[in-house]
Image (cartoon, coloured by chain):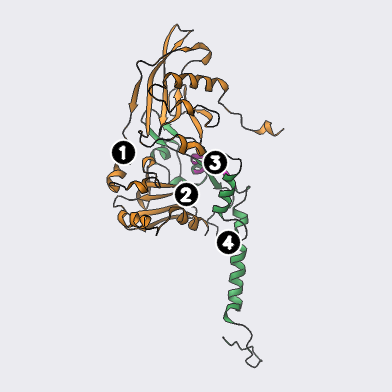
Chain colours: A orange, B green
Amino acid sequence: MFNLFRKKKMIQENDYIFLKALTKALSYKYPYLLPQVSKEFILDKTPNQLGDIGTYTFTLNAKLESKYSNKSLPQFFIIKDISIWNNLKGKFEQIELHILDGMIAGFKVTSEYSDLDLKKIDTSNVKEKHFNNEDKETLKKITGNIPSDFLSQLDIEDTFKIEVPEGEFYVIKNLEDGNYLSMDKKGAVYGMMHDPYLVKKIFDDKNAFFEALKYGEFNIYEYFNKKMSL
Amino acid sequence: MQTFLIPGGAGVKIFQRGFSLRNTLTSIRSGFLNLGKSFSQYKALYWAGKAKPSLTPIINPKTGQVWKQYTELHHRFIPQRWKWAPNWLKNNRFNLKPVSSLQHAQMDPFRARFVPKWVKEMYNLTWK
């Protein structure tokens, strides 16, 4: 009975078959995509309102993000011009895949799967479309070279700018549930909590922050837990 | 040892400082507020269960702008900032609703503050 009220998933078996075929054809160049096409990792799809018709975004299992994400790749790029034969139109048509931190995050297809011949996929003209990430570039200029020991503790690659009355801040760590650690343009480090609302300077400069991390005087999770236990 | 005088009494040592009425009331209040799980404790138990935290990025394929939104726990009736409310009233399955970052920002104007500007504009978010 409770299934009546459960939100029906948009993703179907056909989607997985389609994605398997695409990623298999691309595996010579993007071998990391094929293992990601599973019901355990890709949980659902939703139409992407910011894209053209036929553009979808996936809902991914965040517990598997650390397994599949690759921060050495650009944060976001599009694999374009994957050609697939359309039986109805009698010609090849173009598909694109959206790649986020090395994870398959969305795609664009304008035809019904039933019209497509999954055995005729041509990847010879595949191109990548890349974008500038101004926020990331700005943050990297502010932080300079971060010791590799600390990079894994931070979310520098996923940064974005937060603009609030207190100023402009660049996220350096997502503390989850709408809370962040951030850095301003001078390199001061702030805790940003939304409930109760708080924007508070924790370190005056980046060096003090990295030193405190290095000597164990500051622990990001302890800081968050302390704030959330108040 | 502190001595307290009772009116009409004769300087009998009754209470130590730690047992003064004010301290007693403070500790009762503190104990009442801390009854139940803190947000961090509730969250750890919630995600240790069957629920799968999800990542649903907001992607603008035309500009390449991306905001990674995760499942967040939102205090829907009693916010964390209501300090008079005890933990058990704030951190329970009726008050904490799993929502996406965007849904969270659409429901909580303080959460909306911490959203990228382009998302605020795209989804007409109002923020305090």
* Label 3 residue SS: strand
Q: Amino acid at mark 3?
A: Val
Q: Which residue is mark 3?
A: B99
Q: Which residue lies under the disc numbered 2?
A: B110
Amino acid of disc 4: Trp
Instruction: Please name the amino acid that badge 1 sits on.
Output: Glu
Q: Nearer the viewer, mark 3 or mark 2?
A: 3
Q: CA distance from mark 3 to mark 2?
A: 15 Å
Q: CA distance from mark 3 to mark 1?
A: 28 Å
Mark with earlier residue (2, 4): 4
Closer-to-camera residue (B18/A151): A151
Tag 3 and tag 2 share a subunit = yes
Q: Which residue position holds label 1?
A: A134
Please rate how many residues cluster around mark 4, counting C-alpha atoms within 10 Å: few if below 14, some from 14 to 19, many from 20. few
Kindly identify which chain the residue marked by label 4 belongs to. Answer: B
Label 1 marks a residue whose chain is: A
Picture quadrant where residue A159 is located: top left
Question: Badge 2 sits on which subunit?
Answer: B
Q: Earlier in the sequence, mark 3 or mark 4?
A: 4
Q: CA distance from mark 4 to mark 1?
A: 43 Å
Checking the image for residue A186, the label placed there is none
What label sits on residue B84 in the rendered view?
4
